[in-house]
Image: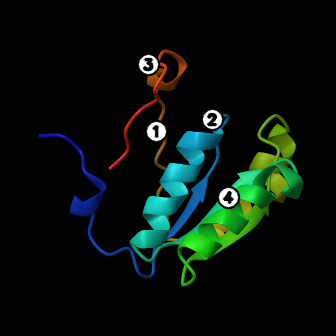
Amino acid sequence: MHFKAENVSDLTGKVALVTGGNPRLVYETMKQLAKKNAKAYMASRTFERARQAIETLMKAIPAAKIEFFELNLADLKQVFTTTLLPVIVKSAPSRIINLSSALHTSCPEGGILFD
């Protein structure tokens, strides 16, 4: 069975934080979360890096609940004490789901087709 975004149930009331070094993969993940009514935070070191993607998503899905979350994953103090961990604790019960794929580094020239 292959994963298809349309098979994901409604995510109303769920919150997601999306990080990543691959802008297209982050964008597509954010788009699917927005389509399924999740509140989604796009994490980046600076707003400028996320601005264009957030604006494009909001135009495509006006009802989307998308916000910027300033986060530098290279700064472990920020991640574990001052920024991310307090948010996770406050939103309990919480889950951390780590998805990673090396596929995007070797994808075909035409890219990966996302449903």
Distance, label 2 to label 4, CA atoms, is 12 Å
Where is 30 relative to 58, above or below?
above
Callout 4: helix, strand or loop? strand
* Front disc: 3 or 4: 3
Callout 2: helix, strand or loop? loop
**Cβ atoms at labels 3 and 1 below 8 Å apart:** no
| Marking on residue 99 | 1
**Cβ atoms at labels 2 and 4 below 8 Å apart:** no
Distance, label 4 to label 1, CA atoms, is 15 Å
* Front disc: 1 or 2: 2
Let me know if residue 91 appears in the view.
no
Residue marked by disc 3: 108
Residue 69, position as x, y percentages in the image: 76, 62
**Cβ atoms at labels 2 and 3 below 8 Å apart:** no
Specify whether 6 is left or right of 85: left
Distance, label 3 to label 1, CA atoms, is 21 Å
Callout 3: helix, strand or loop? loop
Residue marked by disc 2: 22
Residue marked by disc 4: 42
Specify whether 54 is left or right of 82: left
* Front disc: 3 or 1: 3
Which amino acid, mark 1? Leu
Specify whether 22 is left or right of 108: right
In-front residue for pair 34/71: 34
* Front disc: 2 or 3: 3
Q: Residue at x 55, y 71 (%)?
A: 60
Residue situated furthest front in the rendering: 110
Crowding near the residue tagged with mark 3, few <14, some 14–19, many ≥20 C-alpha atoms within 10 Å: few
Which amino acid, mark 4? Met
